[in-house]
Amino acid sequence: MSTRLLLAALLVGASVLVTGCGSGDLPAPSTLNAVDPQPAGAAEITTPPQAEGEGACDAEASLRPGPLPRVGAMPAGSPMAAIVANQRLRVGVDQNTYLFGFRDPGTGQLQGFDIDIAREIAKALFGDPNKIELRSVTAAERISALRDKQVDMIVRTFSATCERRKDVDFSAVYYRAAQRILATRASGIKSADDLAGKRVCVARGTTAPAPLFALPKRPTVIGVTNWTDCLVALQLGQVDAISGDDPILFGLVAQDHNLEVVGQPVGTGAYAVGLPKGSDDMVRFVNGVLERMRSDGTWRQISATRLGPLGQAQDPPEPRYVG
């Protein structure tokens, strides 16, 4: 077929297609809304929680530990005896904070610094660190999970504050953190002073919003369910920065090397094991476990293994005991 005939055939075909597709056959304009990729439940926080160190109590003071009972010989009628009778320790933990409480993609198992602390408590109760039931809870669910008896304790980057002590009891502090700022390397954000007019992401139910509200020119604070939600929001440009405790932020950097932790600390964190209100025997027992971990090197070993890769290994905090 000649080039002229081929061109004519193509033009006729195009004419037929156009004629056959009348205006009545054209697709109607879409009425669907654009996809909103923001994490589920993301919303501005307008009222800050109580900051750590505020309030009339000594938030870090905890009951002095007694001698640890022998495995299999928990005091009758004690919370420890009830847990042993239940044949497992139920612990509320995180599964979204890298190297503190996270699900290892290779094994599917929950691992991390907090998980190891929980297993040491199970070992003291049963002689077996695997006699444990790990239940994933969000930061906002920690108090209600204890109050509603869904778990026996919370080991989940849970900072002791006077406000929280109205509802739960705390062990002695087992880890100290500083609250910092996380931003992309090209953002121009180098300190808290650069957050004015910016959108900063935090995990809802944490103490992280409080220092941000105290800044001279505070940013817009966006609350989400988990710290990994903050990471996604930052990667998508929906927020300008994240503010949280430094081990949490360095865990996010380990997942995205385009990010950096910047500036001086804007707040502090004092992690303790959360326990049901009024469970003095259990508080003393957990403090006994933590005391043993400090003295026999277990705490330092766990810290080096879990947090060393983040540069966040430290010596165990000195406890403050009362009673």
Image: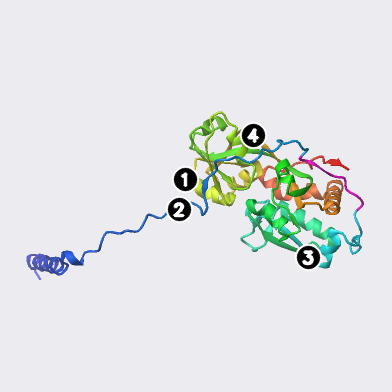
Residues under labels 1 and 4: Cα distance?
24 Å
Q: Label 4, on which residue?
A: 265
- Is 60 covered by the magenta stretch? yes
Q: Residue at x 63, y 54 (%)?
A: 138
Label 3: which secondary element: loop
Residues under labels 4 and 2: Cα distance?
31 Å
Q: For this rendering, which residue is in front, 210 or 318?
A: 210
- Would you say residue 126 is visible in this rendering? no
**Residue mark closest to the camera, 4 vs 2:** 2
Q: Earlier in the sequence, mark 2 or mark 1?
A: 2
Q: Label 2, on which residue?
A: 37
Q: Which residues are magenta?
A: 59-67
Answer whether labels 2 and 3 touch (C-beta < 8 Å). no
Q: Earlier in the sequence, mark 4 or mark 2?
A: 2
Task: List x then y, in percent, for residue 114.
Answer: 72, 52
Task: List x then y, in percent, for residue 246.
Answer: 65, 41
Q: Label 1, on which residue?
A: 238
In which quarter of the view is residue 85 placed? Answer: bottom right
What residue type is disc 1 on? Gln
Residues under labels 2 and 3: Cα distance?
40 Å
Q: For this rendering, which residue is in front, 55 or 51?
A: 55
Q: Residue at x 91, y 57 (%)?
A: 69
Secondary structure mostly seen in magenta is loop
Q: Earlier in the sequence, mark 3 or mark 1?
A: 3
